[in-house]
Amino acid sequence: ELPRTFVLIKPDAVRRGLVGEVLSRFERKGLQIVAMKQVQVSGELADQHYAEHLERDFYPPLRAFVTSGPSVALVLTGDQVVETVRLMNGATDGRKAAPGTIRGDLSLSNRENLVHGSDSAESAEREIALWFPELEPVEGRA
Ligand code: CMP
């Protein structure tokens, strides 16, 4: 069975009209979209999603940003999808991300960096359960 990952296309990407560009990159790579929805993220959902960052200095402005407009939430599947998506997203800071990556090509910010991708299979299953409670959990997965 193929692994899954969670991707959030953040409000900067939606505002800039880059949803199609981001989706197109994942599709052309050969990954499959297994769930997708537009969501207005609440402060509560942001706090749950970013639980590990709640105490960080950068969290209050990150929370304001991620709740500032609609986002698009995705579940993707494919061979080594967690690692593949992180490579395609690039380094967190768009100013340092390699050209050819989503952030490297399209972002100049450490916060407004267009996309989030789960950092491990365990995070992916936690995030999928949080954002897509309607999806079946996959038995035996992290
Ligand atoms: P993401 O992959 O969603 O995980 C945490 C997010 O916090 C990250 O992408 C950035 O949007 C944001 N972030 C991480 N580090 C910083 C930082 N030093 N300053 C501002 N925002 C940050």
Image: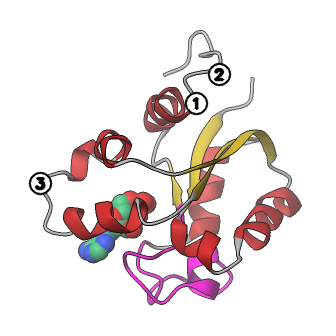
Query: Residue 20: x and y, percent?
Result: 79, 68
Q: Residue at x 54, y 32 (%)?
A: 128
Q: Residue at x 21, y 69 (%)?
A: 58
Q: Residue at x 40, y 59 (%)?
A: 67
Q: Is residue 77 left or right of residue 6?
A: right
Alpha carbon separation for disc pair 3 and 2? 30 Å
Query: Residue 77: x and y, percent?
Result: 73, 39
Which amino acid type is marked by label 3? Glu
Examine the rendered structure and indicate whether residue 16 appears above or below residue 4.
Answer: below
Q: Is residue 130 left or right of residue 98?
A: left
The stretch drawn in magenta includes residue 48 = no
Alpha carbon separation for disc pair 3 and 1? 25 Å
- Residue carrying label 2: 135
Tell me the magenta residue range.
92-115
Q: Most extreme residue toward the top, as rendered?
A: 139
- Residue carrying label 1: 132
SS label for mark 2: loop
- Residue carrying label 3: 55
2 and 1 marks in contact (CB < 8 Å): yes
Which amino acid type is marked by label 1? Phe
Question: Which of 22/10 is in front?
Answer: 10
User: N-terminal of the two: label 3 or label 2?
Assistant: 3
Q: Nearer the viewer, mark 3 or mark 1?
A: 1
User: N-terminal of the two: label 3 or label 1?
Assistant: 3
- Number of callouts in the render? 3
Locate the N terminus and report the quarter of the image it occupies: top right
Q: Residues within 10 Å of mark 3 (few under 14, many from 20)?
A: few
SS label for mark 1: loop
Q: Disc 3 beta carbon < 8 A from ligand 1?
A: no
